[in-house]
Image (spheres, rainbow, N blue to C red):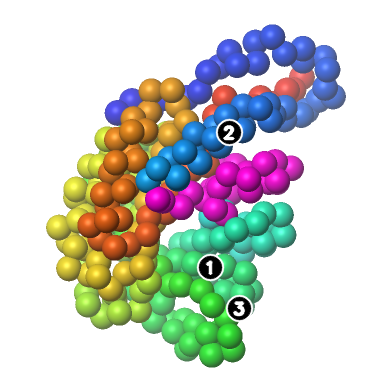
Amino acid sequence: MKTQAGDPGAFAHFDLNRVDTPAFVIDAAKIRTNLQVLSEVKQHSGAKVLCALKAFSMWEVAPIIEEYLDGVSASGLWEARLGFDKYEGEISTYSPAYKAKELPEIAAISDHVIFNTPDQIARHSAAIRGFRDAGEIFDIGLRINPLHSVGEVPKYDPCQPHSRLGFPVDQLTDADIDALDGLHFHTLCEQSFEPLLETWDAIIPIIEPWLPDLKWLNFGGGHHITRADYERDELIEFIAAVQDETGCEVYLEPGEAIALGAGILVGE
């Protein structure tokens, strides 16, 4: 489960003098190659794939991304606005906390609004009812902490002791699930298929009784799906099986995988 990066020699023959500095240089053909891989995973597995804006938010390539993916995931109001203004498709918004004054706009432009704890949902429940009564259509999700560490770098591990990212999965109750349309977890960072499978195996015994009450499961980001050695066939088979067995739609939120090996920063 070694963390790996893309090909550092992908721009070995690029003439750096061609651009004014500082500048990000993007290989649009490589972006399309990566997106085609993600599109094939989407088509063969039945999953929906969103571009994680917190990892790759270069909206100049939004028209390319729209050709292949289902939308974007945002980490707050500003990214949700970016997704609404520059991209087509669904917008899934998760934040560790929301300001009450920002929720009306987030609810208006998001398809999924994902909270960090059941208490947050309860605190904003009156506002949520009001938005829906006014005609806004959006799902409510909850980020869970699987309590199973697979990350290699502690500061990026949301399952480390005392983490505040996500609600501990072993503390979920029937009342918590009643307010939800879906569950979200994000535990990976530049990793392959095996850590995802490990995470699923850790949470499925706990959440299985509630799956008939849910519409979707969001497996977050950190999946290096476009890396040459990623086990894509295994991922496709796994997602198809999860959707068949649970009746839930599966979402993936790759970010770096979209731009892997497709860009450099030129500076002097």
Q: Counting residues from the N terminus, which is met first, the one under dot 1 or under dot 3?
A: 3
**Image quadrant in which the N terminus is located:** top left
Number of marks in the image? Answer: 3
Q: Which residues are magenta?
A: 46-71
Residue highlighted by disc 2:
259
Say whether residue 2 is left or right of residue 22.
Answer: left
Say whether residue 138 is left or right of residue 82.
Answer: left
Residue highlighted by disc 1:
111
Label 1: how many Cα within 10 Å (few below 14, some 14–19, many 20+): some
Residue highlighted by disc 3:
104
47 magenta-colored:
yes
Badge 1 element: loop
User: Residue 173 lies in what quarter of the image?
Assistant: bottom left
Q: Residue at 82% across / 22% down in the picture?
A: 19
Q: Counting residues from the N terminus, which is met first, the one under dot 1 or under dot 2?
A: 1
Badge 2 element: helix
